[in-house]
Image (cartoon, coloured by chain):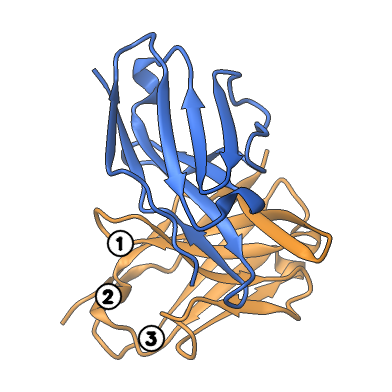
Amino acid sequence: SYVLSQAPSVSTAPGQTARITCGGDNIGIKAVHWYQQRPGQAPVLVLYDDSDRPSGIPERFSGSNFENTATLTISRVEAGDEADYYCQVWDTDSGQQGVFGGGTKLTVL
Amino acid sequence: QVQLMESGGGLVKPGESLRLSCEVSGFSLSDSYMNWIRQAPGKGLEWISYISSSGSTRFYADSVKGRFTVSRDNGKNSLFLQMNSLKADDTAVYYCVKNSGYCHGGSCTNWFDSWGQGALVTVSS
């Protein structure tokens, strides 16, 4: 089945830009979706279709997807952005199934 | 306001069964595709099941295929997950999740736009 790879952790200072990557074989041809999970809470969708934001998600959250890497970019990072972030695709090559990356812990220094 | 509320979690022994329910409000369940997604303690997210709006199409992760069954009762605004032959590895928080997606040019994508708060299932002797 399709595999998504994420770095376990990323650290950023407040006000700076955080970039969280998601690697996959030719992921650029797939639609990638991103979720934020704060400690003790359910995940929340922050981007869908590579770069679209659901209602209520700040413009500070943006995304890109090219060749073998999708990227979630968080500009002007705030303390409240500290969370686990997961990328996700829908795999249709190995049956129909949802696939998540292993998650990246964003620490705001 | 979209709300999803899971119930039915608890402690069971290996080999036993459990049925999770998810009651939804704030949207039309009969128009919505739904999923179950789980998260083992301290681990990442794992998609386990998808069901179409009518219930006619269902997909499962290999890890639960043949043991878990997803169903729905649109008239009662409810989604269900019947879990049989439970194993210790099934210990997790189980989330009921609303689906969004589309198909284009023969390829489809789905994402998970609204999540319940989760129900904890513990499988232990």
* Label 1, label 3: how far apart the Cα atoms are: 18 Å
Lower position in the chain sequence, tag 2 or tag 3: 3
View extreme (right): residue:
B105
Report the side of B54 relative to A30 (left or right): right
Read off the residue under disc 2: B89
Q: Which mark is residue B17?
A: 3
Query: Label 3: few (<14), some or many (≥20) within 10 Å?
Result: some
* Label 2, label 3: how far apart the Cα atoms are: 14 Å
Q: Position of residue A49 (x, y in %)?
A: 67, 43
Query: Which residue is painted at 44% across and 62% down in the image?
Result: A3
Q: Which mark is residue B108?
A: none
Label 3 is placed on what type of residue?
A: Ser
View extreme (top): residue:
A15
Q: Secondary structure at mark 1?
A: loop
Q: Is circle 2 on the same chain as circle 3?
A: yes
Query: Label 2: few (<14), some or many (≥20) within 10 Å?
Result: few
Q: Secondary structure at mark 3?
A: loop
Residue A10 quadrant: top left
Q: Is circle 2 on the same chain as circle 1?
A: yes
